[in-house]
Image: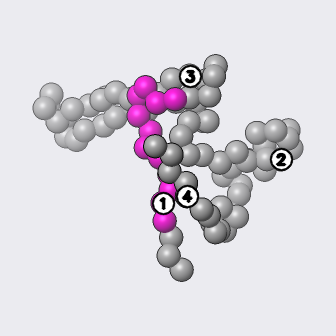
């Protein structure tokens, strides 16, 4: 079976659901400033870009996303690209 990653990139300024917080991406530590490695901080709502709405999103006692099996998220798909 061939798997394709159809997720979209996450970046500041991307479209978010109305009323959700914007994507904020900032460098937290920089090698050029003496840090041992570059570290970034990402702040965003959970409904950005390509994502999964778990049953918990709408059902108080439904399973949360971390409780879903990966098998439930893999299957046939059609990708449509709009200009």
Which of the two marks, 1 or 2, is nearer to us in this view? 1
- In the image, which residues are magenta? 4-15
- Which corner quadrant of the image does residue 59 belong to? top right
Q: What residue does disc 3 label?
A: 21
Q: Are marks 1 and 3 in contact (CB under 8 Å)?
A: no
- Residue 5 bears which disc, if any? 1
Q: Is residue 70 visible?
A: no
The location of residue 31, given as percent across then percent down, is 17, 36
Sequence order check, earlier mark of 1 and 2: 1
Q: What residue does disc 4 label?
A: 79
Q: Residue at x 34, y 34 (%)?
A: 40
- Chief secondary structure of the magenta portion: loop
The residue tagged with tag 1: helix, strand or loop?
loop
Sequence order check, earlier mark of 1 and 4: 1
Q: Residue at x 70, y 64 (%)?
A: 72
Sequence order check, earlier mark of 1 and 3: 1
Camera-side residue of 66 and 53: 53
The location of residue 55, given as percent across then percent down, is 79, 47
Q: Between marks 1 and 3, how big is the CA–CA gap?
A: 25 Å
């Amino acid at each position: 079976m061939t798997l394709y990653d159809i997720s979209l990139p996450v970046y500041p300024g991307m479209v978010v659901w109305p009323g959700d917080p914007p994507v904020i991406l900032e460098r937290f530590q920089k090698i050029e400033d003496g840090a041992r490695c570059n570290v970034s901080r990402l702040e965003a709502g959970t409904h950005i870009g390509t994502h999964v709405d778990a049953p918990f999103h709408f059902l108080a006692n439904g399973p949360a996303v971390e409780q879903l099996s990966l098998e439930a998220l893999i299957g046939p798909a059609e990708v449509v690209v709009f200009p």
